[in-house]
Image (cartoon, grey):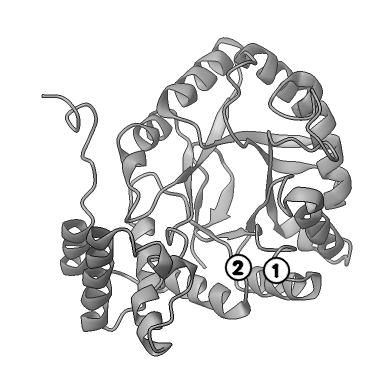
Amino acid sequence: MEYTQLGRTGLEVSRIVLGTMNFGPLTDEADSHTIMDAALDAGVNYFDTANVYGWGENKGRTEKIIGTWFAKGGDRRDKVVLATKVNGNMAAGAPWPNHHRLSAVNIRRAVEASLKRLQTDHIDIYQFHHVDRNTPFEEIWQAIEVLIQQGKILYAGSSNFPGYKIAQANEAARQRGKVGLVSEQCLYNLIERRAEMEVIPAAREYGLGVIPWSPLQSGLLGGVLRKERERGGEGGRSVSRLKDSPALREKVQAYEDLLGKHGIEPGEAALAWLLTRPGVTGPIVGPRTMEQLESGLRAVDLKLSDEVLASLDEIFPGPGPSPEAFAW
């Protein structure tokens, strides 16, 4: 496994991040524990989750699965850089005021609940899952500072923040003499490259590590057309998304043809491409099965040639730098 610094911090993290969103909804507890064991054995030390994972009536379930894994003992908790998130409404039943977003009262409530589910005394990276337009950053940072002083969290990160919110958050933290955000989790992959316009430049300017989520664009970059042919024309949910977009299907086919010519697995290539991108710490791999985890691990050792990288840019061109992408 390769490691890198998380943004401007002294924290070393693996170049693959274990995403846990499928633990509970699609992968049972026993298999989830097996996947976490295998990931840790392979050197993956960065585990990502969120308080709402499990979804619906089962939100919080994923954190509980991770907590029972930690409770097995050994040094697994000491080896893991644990990241979770706050923002979504965690009230049982109908939404209830102050059980979501980033008010000081909800941050305090949410972190205590996550610590209990995770069966740990601290969270390494506490991430704002979405922007909160109603709460000023002065209040957010005051709440975070208290949690850091109490030893309940070590760092704060963001997820799904636009570039200007990254700037606002870190300028507010700077005025308080604090570190501010250390990471940004954003939607970023070969198909969806809009983050290159504002989000990634802002993250790099302020020293945030970039953690791409959905690196395979919900499976579209994982060889879906080849799998469709192998199944005799039967496609899964990913293929169905291409029916209404002939242009995208043509690009995905060109992508698979290119990688087939070079003997490279599409899903591994999509991850390896992200590992070449400036500012990227490591993509989130959210396996449902051991096979998917193993594929993600192989991507770390895959070095794409300049020829392949150039061809990928031709198939899926990025938006270009801002502001030139939308202005003279």
Above or below 17: residue 287: below
Above or below 201: residue 214: below
Q: Position of residue 18 (x, y in %)?
A: 60, 61
Residue found at x 43% / y 87%: 231
Mark yes or no: residue 278 visible: yes
Distance of mark 1 from mark 2, alpha carbons?
11 Å
Q: Position of residue 323 (x, y in %)?
A: 22, 26
The quadrant of the picture occupied by the C terminus is top left
Residue found at x 86% / y 62%: 68
Give the mark nearest the N terminus, 1 or 2.
Answer: 1
Kindly identify which residue carries mark 2.
43
Kindly identify which residue carries mark 1.
36
Residue most extreme to the front: 244
Question: Is residue 74 left or right of 102 when viewed as pictured?
Answer: right
Question: Is residue 10 left or right of 150 when viewed as pictured?
Answer: left
Q: Nearer the viewer, residue 80 or 283?
A: 283
Q: Position of residue 203 (x, y in %)?
A: 42, 33
Q: Are marks 1 and 2 in contact (CB under 8 Å)?
A: no
Q: Crowdedness of circle 1 by 10 Å Cα count: few (<14), some, many (20+)?
A: many
Instruction: In the rendered structure, find residue 122 and report the number of the disc placed on it.
Output: none
Q: Quadrant of residue 152?
A: top right
Q: Nearer the viewer, residue 217 or 39?
A: 217
Mark yes or no: residue 151 visible: no
Above or below 303: residue 141: above
Secondary structure, mark 1, is helix
Question: Is residue 170 left or right of 316 when viewed as pictured?
Answer: right
Residue found at x 62% / y 13%: 136
Q: Quadrant of residue 246?
A: bottom left
Question: Is residue 297 left or right of 101 when viewed as pictured?
Answer: left
Q: Position of residue 212 (x, y in %)?
A: 46, 50
**The residue under label 2 is which amino acid type?**
Gly
User: Mark 1 or mark 2, which is nearer to you?
Assistant: 1
